[in-house]
Image (tube, coloured by chain):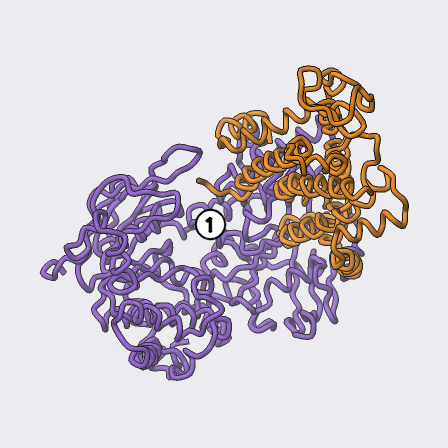
Chain colours: A orange, B purple
Amino acid sequence: MNTQAVGKALRTAPPTAWFGMIVILAYIAVAFLAPVIAPYGEREVVGQQYLPWSAEHILGTDKLGRDMFTRLIYGARNTVGIAFLTTLLAFLLGSILGLLAATTGGKLDQLLSRAVDVIMAIPALILALLLLTIVGTSITNMILVIALIDSTRVFRLARAVAMNIVVMDYIEAARLRGEGMRHLILREILPNAAAPLVAEFGLRFCFVFLSISALSFLGLGIQPPTADWGSMVRENATLITFGEITPLLPAGAIALLTVGVNFVVDWMLHRASGLKE
Amino acid sequence: MSEQSLLLEIKDLHIEGRADETWQPIVKGVDLTLHRGEVMGLIGESGAGKSTIGLAAMGFTRDGCRISGGSIEFDGINLRKASEAKRRGLRGKRIAYVAQSAAASFNPAHKLIDQYCEAPLSHHVMSREEAEKDAVELYRRMRLPNPEEIGFRYPHQVSGGQLQRAMTAMAMACRPDLIIFDEPTTALDVTTQIEVLAAIRDIVEQFHTAAIYITHDLAVVAQMADRIKVLLKGDEVEEADTRTMLATPKEDYTKSLWAVRSHERKEQPLAGPGETPVVSLRNIDAAYGKAPVLFDVSFDIHARRTVAVVGESGSGKSTAARVITGLLPPSSGEVLFDGQALPTGYQARSKDQLRQAQMIYQMADTALNPMQKIREIIGRPVAFYLGLSGKALEERTRELLNLIELEPDDFIDRLPSELSGGQKQRIGIARALAAEPRFIICDEVTSALDQLVAEGILKLLDRLQSEFDLAYMFITHDLATVRAIADEVVVMKEGKVVEQGRKSEMFQPPHHPYTELLLSSVPEMDPDWLDRLLAERAAAGTEPA
């Protein structure tokens, strides 16, 4: 798409899409500018534990006396950054294999598809917990495990989309020209499969994000003292019993981003499917 | 006809379609009057607004379209002002619609007779038993085989021609006053077309139903319609009764439509006995899985010659092309190129072997990658086979665009979606030429195009052939195209070659009986042609095909 088309698309975007885009941009800005915005250090103990909201500590402090607001901001950097990296990895793996399976067909397709079926047969969170227990808990391992599990979903989508493309005459023409697999996949098929894949990227990002938070909440994800929204909810969960909403703020941050991303994805899917309002 | 009562009156109809956020006119003020029992032929190229007018006669517009002006009055009811519920009450009961593709219009999950009964039941015209009895009666009148049983089959269990007749029977279920036929025989083979045309005409006459018959085929409309209206880009060109229109068209555009089938190339002499054919099929047998499709097919194609391969759908003509390109390795026999046997699968062929044989597809829409610009579509084979890049590549691409008569500056950076059907097909030709081949397979390249556009494509192919000494294999089911372009003709039926020879011999008797059937089934402009043909066939004791 050229700049003109992008401009036109933006001008005609519905308010929900604009809301989503603003939320996403705000999160990205916060993630990049974390050290500038945050009043204290990420792991710095700045006062008593569980301090109430005050001018000094806008959102109070957590169970170790660290500034909640600061940790919330650093949490954006860690959680969003890791989720993005994981999604990217899942996409590279899933879409390349999916397109390859659809283009090649035959035994390779069978092999890959059945392997994916096997992985998908096990509930994602349980499989993630299982694998993390085997390979050990670390950020790298977590990224790899979640990327592997989520790549199976991407694989299915990429394969299904490509299946409809490989039967087109222009693919036959390219094959008869003697084009290699690389050209077929990258130049002929991928541009036509891009729209649904990009939309899926947004959606998948939300799922990955939630998986990371869930794993962190269970203690197998991002490890303390690194700030992360999932573990922040768990660490301060006791406060909920006292009617405090502070521990729910990280959860709210997760929810807001998820909603924002979904608004944008809905809009992109709508455009990709060629529907007019 | 004027003494009969008025059924449909459309006045100054304007319809707009939404494109790029603005409303563009599709129909620009068309009048149409239809009396009871009258058949009106609407004719024009694609984009003329024929189908849009046909649907508007039911008070219906497609999504993204709106009626912006004029009036539609059906038997005293103003369809523009009537409520949706009232209009729905008319549709299926008093106005029926027969679509181009019966295969796509039937629900594949229900039996034919269930779908037949739907309209009479929902309009409370008949009980289920009555409707079923009626269906059998109408199936019989449409001359469907086994009328008692055919209704209990699913759509995929009957042939295309039978399906189209079942669809017409279904439209007749409530004995409507008006039926709209939207290109009902366009997707059918000529031999099948005849029976459908005859059946439609009979049943419309028997029930004294009025009809709007939409088509782009002049010869077909000449058989079916009492009056013909010619449309061009949403405007009426002229209207007259069929015989007047055929004999003395007034407007230049109509005359050009009538004259369209005039292109005929001079037949090349047969190649000398010592000349090696460019492509030669030797005793080819081929099968899809276990189902055999080709039986002992042999023919030669020489340089500077066009061999037309003719036959109905399922006759194996496209399969023969797949064998030549290596997409379907034959189970026995061989394909020779310049006297050398080609490896059977395309994967085993060398880059140069692949380069020499190119293909042009029927549907330019699916043959061009919608996400690539013309520059890349045409440039890729140039870069791939000839190794050109940078400035040389750009120059060659422009040269190719000039060859196919498209202005390079204007077209090189467009996407396929920004081209018309004929322009897309020209790009398909340029892509084949880019490889500098010696042999090109043209698979029904003009069948999806309007006649004027198709004529331009045929002339272009003709010119390129003499310029580059190309050999063409031209797959088609349209004998008018054969007449226009072929030197030699191969007639195929059920996977076998039934007759082959020079074009001049093929169009002269004596014919093989199947060739005779094909030739006689091509509609002619003469309005009496169908009657005469049916009478002849009845006299000869052959059932109408």
> In this view of the protein, can residue B433 be seen by the observer?
no
SS type, badge 1: loop
In this orientation, which residue lies closer to the viewer: B9 or B469?
A: B9
**Which residue is the site of mark 1?**
B449
Q: Residue at x 68, y 71 (%)?
A: B287
Q: Nearer the viewer, residue B236 or B481?
A: B236
Percent across and percent down for residue A108 are 80, 57
Q: Quadrant of residue A30?
A: top right
Relative to B479, residue B152 above or below: below
Assess disc 1: are there few (<14), some (14-19) or many (≥20) residues with their C-alpha within 10 Å of its C-alpha.
many
Q: Quadrant of residue B135?
A: bottom left
Residue at the left extreme? Answer: B3
Q: Amino acid at mark 1?
A: Leu
Disc 1: host chain: B
Q: Is residue A106 above or below residue B434?
A: below
Which residue extends farthest front? A242
Measured as percent of width and height from the top left, residue A195 is found at: 61, 41
Q: Is residue B528 toward the left or the right of residue A230 in the image?
A: left
User: Viewer-proximal residue, A224 or B341?
Assistant: A224
Which quarter of the rendering shows the N terminus of chain A? top right
Vertically, is A223 above or below B465? above
Residue drawn at x 33%, y 48% is: B61
Q: Quadrant of the C terminus of chain A?
A: top left
